[in-house]
Amino acid sequence: MKESVRSLFKSARQSISEINRERKSHRIFDSLSRLPEFKKAIQIMVYLSRGEEVVTHFMVKKWLDQKKKIYAPKVESDKLLPCLINHWEDLEYGKYNVLEPKETLYIANPNELELILVPGIAFTPKGGRIGMGKGFYDRFLSKTKAIKIALAYEEQISSTLPLEQHDIAMNIIITDKNIYRT
């Protein structure tokens, strides 16, 4: 069931032109930047986008110049490690062809993080999330009290999804058209 949902929402994401993905990502960034939870947070973990995901590269580059501590996920032994990055050049393509830190200079305890930006394939307005299917984020998110914010295109929102008990809910979902608080 989840695989067919993933396929459907991946197709919806792929149908968005590259220029529209870029525009929508900038709208999402603007909404995120205005959130009180984001303004207050110093220690932030950010996924590094690939393919048709909401683009985060320009966001990370901007935040590295600010007073925020930015952590990027690194996959090791089927775990996500939140690794501090100081410069964009600290990144390289890793195991899943996703940018990740070259070195683990500092790995945060999940409870040090104040806010985590989470990718996904499909979401419900009440915070439900379906990811890529490997469970990396659900396992990691279950160990932290950080605010969980999903970045998504409105095309990724569905009133219902086949969620399971281990699927970790988001606190906030920001799309190019709405902010859903749960």
Image (spheres, helix red, strand yellow):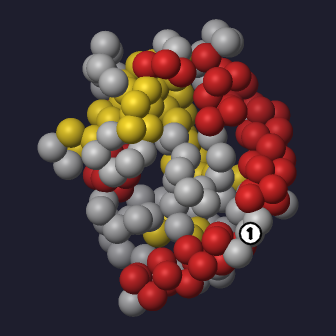
In which image quadrant can residue 2 be found?
bottom left
In which image quadrant can residue 37 be found?
top right
Name the side, left or right, on which 27 lies relative to 156: right
Asked whether the viewer can see residue 112, the reply is no
Q: Residue at x 81, y 56 (%)?
A: 19
Q: Residue at x 68, y 32 (%)?
A: 59
Whole-percent x, y for residue 78 in the image: 20, 49
Q: Amino acid at mark 1?
A: Ile
**Which quarter of the image is occupied by the N terminus?**
bottom left
Asked whether the viewer can see residue 64, the reply is yes
Q: Nearer the viewer, residue 96 or 166?
A: 96
Indicate whether 175 appears above or below 55.
Answer: below
Q: Residue at x 48, y 78 (%)?
A: 6
Indicate whether 71 appears above or below 166.
Answer: above
Name the side, left or right, on which 109 lies relative to 181: left
Indicate whether 173 appears above or below 68.
Answer: below
Q: Secondary structure at mark 1?
A: loop
Name the side, left or right, on which 111 lies relative to 41: left
**Which quarter of the image is occupied by the C terminus?**
bottom right
| Residue position marked by numbered label 1 in the rendering | 16
